[in-house]
Image (spheres, rainbow, N blue to C red):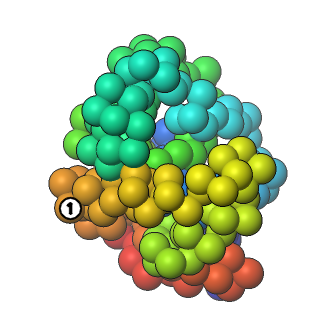
Amino acid sequence: MPVLDRIIQRITPAVTRVAIDGPDAAGKTTMASELAARLDRNVVRVSVDDFHNRPEVRRRQGSLSPKGYYEDTFDYDAFRARLLEPIPAGAVLLVDGVFLLRPELRSYWDLSIYLDVRPDETLRRALIRDFGIFGDAVRERYTLRYLPGQAHYRALADPLGHADIVVDNNDPESPKLVASR
């Protein structure tokens, strides 16, 4: 059975909040959009990217700091207050983004999915996807900030160990279910 079908089976009427986590360029937004299109209920689609802190907060530990990437990128207080607590009755909230399985957010998710992608594949995808945004600085940003920030997150929060579903998404045309708890 395809991975997406297995995930859809897990989104029962009791499930109202679904996190799709994983490193940058893992395919989180694509998976969330595919799930939203196939679910037979009201879906609220959001990305944690909609809750970025102001640049001066995001970069207070340095513009290339991996620790700053993990600690300062998002306004989690606003994320919780505006999104996680007030969900429309009968709806399912699909949230995609990095760091969604950090300790202070775990209890909000009825179902959590982690898309696992190797760092070299993340970088390969980022060089294609983000060149238009960052230009030649893409490799530096990923090598110094984003990839080490993800390593920091994995070491600190163990998202693979806490996710309900882990998907190997190194080949997005053929994702593989690694764990389903």
Q: Position of residue 35 (x, y in %)?
A: 70, 55
Instruction: Quadrant for the N terminus, please.
Output: bottom right
Vertical relation: 60 (above or below) 177: above
Q: Residue drawn at (66%, 56%), measured in percent from left and top?
A: 136
Vertical relation: 57 (above or below) 113: above
Q: Residue drawn at (46%, 73%), measured in percent from left and top?
A: 119
Vertical relation: 137 (above or below) 128: above
Q: Residue drawn at (66%, 65%), measured in percent from left and top?
A: 127
Near-viewer residue (102 or 181):
102
- What type is the residue that disc 1 sits on? Ala
Q: Residue drawn at (70%, 52%), measured in percent from left and top?
A: 135
Q: Circle 1: is it few (<14), some (14-19), or many (20+) Cα within 10 Å?
A: few
For label 1, the SS is helix
Near-viewer residue (11 or 68):
68
Residue sitting farthest toward the right: 37
In the rendered image, which residue does mark 1 sit on? 155
Near-viewer residue (118 or 14):
118
Q: Position of residue 104 (x, y in %)?
A: 25, 35
Whether residue 93 is visible here, answered yes or no, is no
Q: Position of residue 102 (x, y in %)?
A: 29, 45
Instruction: Quadrant for the C terminus, please.
Output: bottom left
Q: Is residue 72 left or right of residue 134?
A: left
Near-viewer residue (8 or 171):
171
Residue 105 in which image quadrant: top left
Residue sitting farthest toward the front: 136
Q: Is residue 79 left or right of residue 131?
A: left
Count numbered badges in the picture: 1
Whether residue 90 is visible here, answered yes or no, is yes
Vertical relation: 87 (above or below) 139: above
